[in-house]
Image: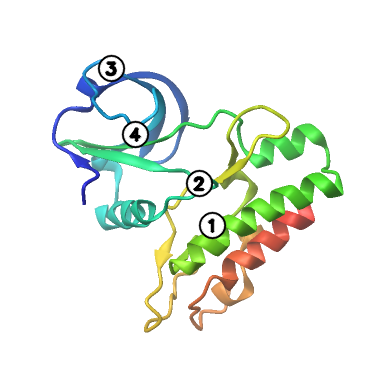
Amino acid sequence: MGFFKKSEVKKNYELGKDLGSGNFAVVKEATKTKANPSAEIPNKVAIKVIDKAKVEDMNDIQREIEVMGMLDHPHVIKLFEIYDEPKKMMLVMELVTGGELFDRIVAKGSYTEADAAEVMKTLCQALAYMHQKKIVHRDLKPENILYASSADDAPIKVADFGLARVVSGKEMMKTACGTPGYVAPEVLQNKGYDSGAVDVWSTGVILYIL
């Protein structure tokens, strides 16, 4: 995969403030250095710094990278490149500054029907694109939908592909995963599921909340 770079990330990026953190990763704002030749990558990016020692199964990270590498859509967070160092793996991604849909819902109290329709239309466009590529997200919720900027009319971007899978059509997905309030019944029934319908259920819950 052409995403992987061998040089140290610090040669090409100056790491800045923390944007968020999880069990095994920290997301930092970063700025391209003069040594970075890539014209396709914007000056400001987000870098997900993964601590390999804290990751139970690196195959999960490889799957996330595989999925993100297949996606190029205006409403999906873009992966630009990867730096694989001995102790850390760094994913250079599109920087968005508008926060989570969840925070926007809390701040607004509720959405107008027109605003909710716009969010839904955009989310469904992103989902249609992902499902066409046989990618199922499996963890859609307002915390994983980000705004590009703080503007009222900022576009949304689908993020966090840690639970996403590419479905082959031959095998069923059996993992019960996701977030309880948003997860589809078939995911919990332990009988297997093989389509993006589980994402559509989660989208319906998001619409209800909006």
Determine the residue positioned at 39% across, 22% down: 43
Which residue is tagged 4? 40
Give the percent coordinates (x, y) of residue 57. 27, 55
The outermost residue toward the top is 34
Of helix, strand and loop, which one carries label 3?
loop
Q: Earlier in the sequence, mark 2 or mark 1?
A: 1
Q: What crowding class fits label 1: few (fewer than 14 Cα within 10 Å), some (14-19), or many (20 or more)?
A: many
Residue 187, how many percent across, how many down? 55, 73
> Contact, CB < 8 Å: mark 2 with mark 1?
no
Cα–Cα span, label 4 and label 2? 20 Å
Q: Name the residue tied to disc 2.
A: 159
Q: Nearer the viewer, mark 2 or mark 3?
A: 3
**Amino acid under disc 2:** Ala
Which label's residue is closer to the chain start, 4 or 2? 4
N-terminal label among 3 and 1: 3
Question: Label 1 belongs to which residue?
Answer: 139
| Residue pictured at 58% horizontal, 64% vertical | 199
**Amino acid bearing label 3:** Thr
Q: Amino acid at mark 4?
A: Glu
Apparent side of residue 34 relative to residue 192 in the rendered image (left or right): left
Q: Nearer the viewer, mark 4 or mark 2?
A: 4
Seen in the picture, residue 59 relative to 30 is either above or below; the reply is below
Q: Which mark is residue 33?
A: 3
Q: Nearer the viewer, mark 1 or mark 4?
A: 4
Return the residue nearer the eye: 174 or 167.
Answer: 167
